[in-house]
Amino acid sequence: MKSLEIFVFVVYSLCLTFIFLYSLVQLQLAWLYFRSKKNKAVTPAPALPTNWPLVTVQLPLYNEIYVTERLLDCIMALDYPPEKLQVQVLDDSTDNTTALVAAKVAAYQAAGRNITHVRRPNRTGYKAGALQYGLASATGEFIAVFDADFLPKPDFLQQTIPAFDAPHIGVVQTRWGHLNQDYSILTQLQAFGLNAHFTVEQTGRSVGGHFINFNGTAGIWRKSCILDAGGWQPDTLTEDLDLSYRAQLKNWRLRYLENVEAPAELPAAMNAIKSQQFRWTKGAAETARKHLKEVLFSNLTWGTKVNALFHLLNSSVFVALLIAAILSVPVIFFIRDISVYNPLFSIRGLYLISLVALILFYWLSYQQLNAYRPKSILSFISKLFFFLVFSMGLSLHNSIAVIEGFLGKKTPFIRTPKFNIRSVQDRWQNSRYAVKNISVLAFLEGLLCLYFLFGVYLDFRLQSYGTLPFHVMLSLGFGSVFYYSLKHSQ
């Protein structure tokens, strides 16, 4: 073996091994979820309080002219004693959103409702800064947070507040629904992935006694928990994950309610999807950089430590996937002496095991939210295939975000624009917040599509059919991301 071949073999093997271990953790969560559903042990619903506590609803906004009014009308329609409800509109906007908020707030104040329009001197700390700023004047014992595109049902607080039935419960998180899931193939694939997180992953971690996370919106905090954990801090792009870990490291418990849904709008434009993915993946890496050492050296059980390790490093899967993908092409050339490379074939088998684990993981989620019938199985197979393809296509973009997060490079919080997209007839292309520029990164994704098409050619030429499906999916993934990046920039 030449030194270069050894290096490629070792790195390639390490990447596949990391993906394999991550898949095992996902498989364990799937088992916990399956067991919880199979047992069908129904926990009695907490008793409704005779005296409802004070609740503050915080609505962080930044330039959301298309969804602000519907949000405020929805929140003010919450079925909760008005004298026990305070609403804070934390408005950092620099456009006409502020005027829309002011008019709505004035109308509701005139009707006797407790709603305030909160404006900061500057946008320091972005969303985390806005939430912390509003906390100083929040009168509620509990703090509910909703992003601009969420539309909770009127009974949301009645379903969630009773879940704080023990003093150590610091957070109640609910499941995200999707207002525009069927708008396009892109929204369908996003919903497919998010549904797995909000069924199997969150429930599995919860019933397994592991750390879960507040998802930034559609959840409620006990105010004393926020204060005890150190408040909202802006040093990561995922202030929600950061505060979740700080709270749980202080022995607060986070409760997840899968059966309570809060619908929201999925981003329909590729640039919006990329900005959201960048924030989530980079923020996860920043949070891992901030808390991983403390988690590993804590007095948590080893099972919870391992789960938290892969929870915090889940965005690193994109880095491992990208490196393994790029190296898979030269690996075709290196494999000539089968006896020397027998270990490599064993390592490559880990990828197939990982794939089986992910199929079970996503199937549990899909069948939970869809009726079990032959048509749904075919739909699942196609959605899983295209979801994996799409995820592979985003691996370069997300890997850059992850690397920046671990290196400590700071970038501003870029909110995901929403356009009030509800039906297939709605259009976002001429909206004020539509991003029309095309980045250099998109052209690199196009080049990677060609690179993996070359890999497909080599698979046939050298009869290396083991990597053929991998290269086909990679070329489709990078090609589709490149295509939509161009199309949505016109």
Image: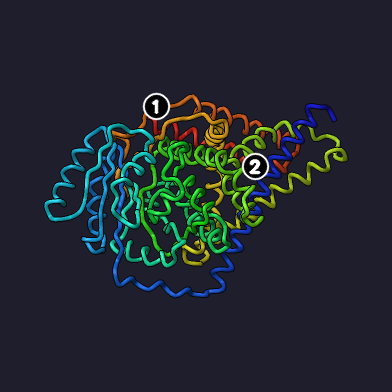
Q: Nearer the viewer, residue 384 or 261?
A: 261
Q: Taking the image as drawn, is residue 219 in sight? A: no
Q: Taking the image as drawn, is residue 367 in sight? A: yes
Disc 2 marks which amino acid? Phe
Q: Residue at x 57, y 27 (%)?
A: 447
Disc 1: which residue = 437
Which one is in front in this view, the residue at disc 1 or the one at disc 2?
1
Q: Nearer the viewer, residue 376 or 169?
A: 169
Gap between marks 1 and 2 measured at Cα: 31 Å
Q: Residue at x 30, y 53 (%)?
A: 57
Residue at the right extreme?
339
Disc 1 marks which amino acid? Asn
Q: Is residue 193 above or below residue 38?
A: above
| Quadrant location, the C terminus | top left
Q: Residues within 10 Å of mark 2 (few under 14, many from 20)?
A: some
Element under label 2? helix
Q: Nearer the viewer, residue 160 or 378?
A: 160
181 left or right of 11 in image: left
Disc 2: which residue = 470
234 left or right of 286 in image: left
Q: Nearer the viewer, residue 63 or 286?
A: 286
Element under label 1? loop
Q: Residue at x 50, y 67 (%)?
A: 372
Residue 477 rendering spot, x and y as whole percentages = 55, 39
Q: Residue at x 19, y 41 (%)?
A: 100
Residue at the left extreme?
110
| Quadrant location, the N terminus | top right
Residue 27 rendering spot, x and y as whole percentages = 63, 57
On residue 360, the disc is: none
